[in-house]
Image (cartoon, helix red, strand yellow):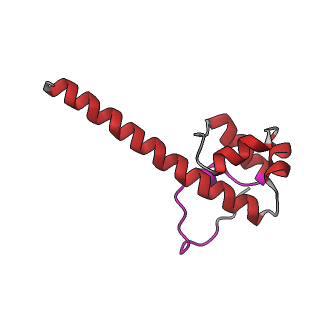
Amino acid sequence: MDRNEREQKDREEERELFRQETTRVFAENLKREREAAGLTQEALGALADLDRTHVGYLERKRRTPEVPTVRRLAEALGISSGRLVDPYDPNKAPSTDD
């Protein structure tokens, strides 16, 4: 394997690690925000015009969210999209979204 091939492989691995971390952070935030809103997966799905199974897959990290899905879920929860994708810091004061 030459240098260019190694660099390409390294970039692909970095992208995959980033995707996995983004999916993990989103899943944790989505579940926490949904539960804080007192919603079931089915209720949130209905508000966001998504099937409840899709919400479940996202919360279990079985799907990587796309931008339009993040926006629809955030809107349904009454929060900013950033709240779903930013790493959670329990020591940080809650934001006053929307």
Q: Quadrant of residue 34?
A: bottom right
Magenta span contains residue 81 = yes
Residue found at x 79% / y 62%: 37
| Residue 96 appears in the rendering | yes
**Horizontal placement of 59 versus 91: left or right?**
right
**Horizontal placement of 63 versus 53: left or right?**
left
**Horizontal placement of 64 versus 47: left or right?**
left
* Residue 89 spot, x, y in % from top left: 53, 67
Q: Mostly what secondary structure, the magenta segment?
A: loop
56 or 83, nearer to the observer: 56
* Residue 38 spot, x, y in % from top left: 82, 64
Q: Quadrant of residue 1?
A: top left
78 or 31, nearer to the observer: 31
* Residue 11 spot, x, y in % from top left: 31, 34
Magenta span contains residue 41 = no
Residue found at x 19% / y 24%: 4
* Residue 43 spot, x, y in % from top left: 85, 51
The stretch of residues the image draws in magenta is 77-94
Residue found at x 64% / y 69%: 94
Q: Quadrant of the C terminus?
A: bottom right
60 or 88, nearer to the observer: 60
Residue found at x 22% / y 31%: 7
Q: Quadrant of residue 96?
A: bottom right
